[in-house]
Image (cartoon, helix red, strand yellow):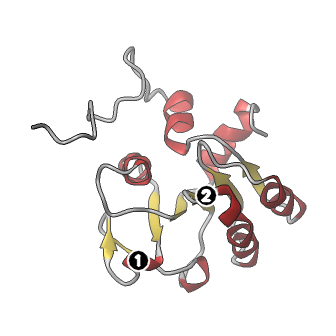
Amino acid sequence: MHNDLHALRRIFKTCPTIAVVGLSAEWHRPSYFAAKYMQSHGFKIVPVNPRYAGTPVLGETCYASLGDIPFKVDMVDVFRRAEDVLPIAEQAVQIGARCFWQQLGVANPEADALARQAGLDSVSNRCVKIEHARLFGGLNWVGVNTGVISARRLV
């Protein structure tokens, strides 16, 4: 699945609602960048982070867990450490998600296997923002343009 461009393109075209587990409300965090990019490209973002539960992140209500979301979610995009991912994969299966996506730097083989066995598309160690930009023309000659050169505060 990881290198199958047709499968990745199909995932993006058939998964308009993305629950982002571990989404931060801090604009300089990678989870915020990725979710904001996907939102700006027409995807409905559903923030999942117990720290912000009940408050808006990117203009959407944040939920404490996947099980708290009262509507259908197509993709679960995970911004958590690899050792924390297996229970999230179990929740993704329980809520009937179609795709389980582990972000760049996150790869839990057990979670990947569990998702696949349950019939979900599963992607590991890939950035949803980068892959979408690569497949749908969002990259330019300078690469992945986040609009921020450095996350460090200027003195």
**Residue found at the far left of this picture:** 155
Q: Image height check: is 104 above or below 64?
A: above
**Residue found at the far front of this picture:** 155
Reading the image, the residue beneath label 1 is 51
Q: Amino acid at mark 2?
A: Arg
- For residue 117, what is the image quadrant? bottom right
Q: Secondary structure at mark 2?
A: loop
Work out how far the residue at label 2 is from the one at label 1, CA to CA, in angstroms. Answer: 16 Å
Q: Amino acid at mark 1?
A: Arg
Q: Is residue 89 left or right of residue 33?
A: right
**Could you classify mark 1 by the number of other residues whose Cα lies within 10 Å: few (under 14), some (14-19), or many (20 or more)?**
some
Q: Residue at x 43, y 29 (%)?
A: 138
Q: Which label number is shown at residue 81?
A: 2
Q: Residue at x 53, y 38 (%)?
A: 132
Q: Residue 54: x percent and y percent?
A: 37, 84
Q: Which label number is shown at residue 4?
A: none
